[in-house]
Amino acid sequence: MKMKYIKLTVAIILLFQVVACTDNILDKSPVSSFSAEGFYKTKSDAQAGVYGIYNAAQSVFRVNFAYWGEGRADNVQTDQSGEGLILMQNNLSESASSADWSTLYRMISRANYAIKYIPDVYKDDPGGGAQLIGQAKALRALAYFYLVRVWGDVPLITEPYTSTDQDIFVTKTDKEQVLDQIEQDLTYAATNCVEKFNNEKDRIMVTQGTANALLTEVYMWRHKYSEAVGSSQLVLNNPLYSLVSNMDDWGKIFTDGYSKESIFEVGYNDEQTNLLRVLYALGSYAIYTPSEKFKASYESGDRRIPYVYDTTLSDPKAIWKFLGKGVNDEDPSKSHQDIVLIRLADIMLLRAEALTQLGGAENINEALNLLNKIRTRAGLPAFNTEQEAADKYGDLESAILHERSIELCFEGHRWFDLVRTGRAISTMQPINGLSDEGNLVWPISTNVLNKNPNMEQNDYYK
């Protein structure tokens, strides 16, 4: 009887997590209590349910995009105590705030409700809700992609909790099975989402281009290079996206948002804020500043760097990239800039890497062309041959990865690039002693372990 009561209580709590929204995706008010099944009655309800998933994404990424994607890598350093130092020194424990996956599963829970109940709203128009379901599946895939990259094997939950007969004490699923589900969800989204909204929603809501770009990221994580070449070509052919042409516009990708280069941003505003300022530009020293290694790694004459941090200081106190060139690091106001998760330069460099892995003269030539588009925009000389890139960085793949490190710095990609390419240990061991493959994933939070007796800690942290 007690177990039944626990299940019912948790099920009710999960049902309360759906969010009702106005027509403005960034203007959301939570609903205190209702049955999700009873909520999904009208098309407006269906849209509101999907907006609720975006709302959950705001909570997921407001700080953790940097902790997960940058905090354990070599481009940042910190003079602060707390989470930033814990990650930088590789002293992870189950009490670390970034070890708690609860917000990601909240995002997944909202997506599961939408996927289950939206078809009921559109039962007289079977194809009418497909684009909303596509958005929900893509956002679920995004959440699971972070879960797999951060924790490895994780519980795969694709149905909402609607009955006390469902087992809430889930166990882990093999990460490859989770990745299979991610691919299925994104393939559906790439077919069924809209091509474009013809407004700013093209950057902060999921379109076909968003799904294809995220598929490229997933394929590269799984080393499916041919598939990555195919999905990235769809992104490059998409008229929604093009590289900005000058450095002022490059800076505005992050400070202003909604750039033509942007593929997917997590949207924020004055009411829905994030922690970019705390992470990168607040007080005597931000949580993260550019590492000495990063500052020594860029080529002379790179036009991007003055937009990234104050190059006139030997020990810069802030990273300007998201908050603006010359940002006042004493300004305590909350940050409302969007967090750019995926943009065209990212996909172009992933495509270049995939082509390099596949080899062949034609592929190598295209890889060089893609790499050079990013380099020459930054004021750097093009590599005329593969050998020129190899002479400078060891091989073409290393030249591309170096370009990703500079072009995408502090955007939440560096750690995942190191793990994905098998370079995390060789890169980080001299910095913080990382030496064990099992240490590449995060521990599972105490909060999660205490709530689920069936959940096992990741092996390295037992």
Image (cartoon, rainbow, N blue to C red):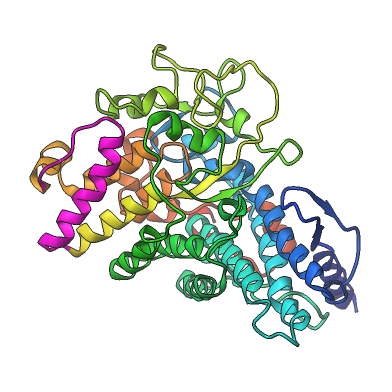
Nearest to the observer: residue 18 or residue 135 = 135
The answer to whether residue 374 of the structure is visible from this angle is: yes
In this view, the residue farthest toward the front is 198
Residue plotted at (60% across, 59% down): 197
* The magenta stretch spans residue 366: yes
Residue 131 coordinates in the image, percent (x, y): 62, 72
Residue 372 coordinates in the image, percent (x, y): 23, 43
Residue 103 coordinates in the image, percent (x, y): 68, 54
Judge left or right: residue 261 versus residue 123. Answer: left
Residue 154 coordinates in the image, percent (x, y): 56, 66
Nearest to the observer: residue 166 or residue 246 = 246
Q: Quadrant of the N terminus?
A: bottom right
* The magenta stretch spans residue 441: no
Residue plotted at (72% across, 48% down): 26
Quadrant for residue 22, please give it: bottom right
Judge left or right: residue 218 versus residue 456. Answer: left
Judge left or right: residue 252 versus residue 293. Answer: right
The answer to whether residue 428 of the structure is visible from this angle is: no
Nearest to the observer: residue 198 or residue 89 = 198
Name above or below for residue 227 compared with residue 348. below
Residue plotted at (30% across, 48% down): 423
Number of numbered discs: 0
Name above or below for residue 432 compared with residue 369. above
What span is colored magenta in the figure?
A: 359-385
Q: Quadrant of the C terminus?
A: bottom right
Judge left or right: residue 95 versus residue 405. Answer: right
Q: Magenta span: helix, strand or loop, mainly? A: helix
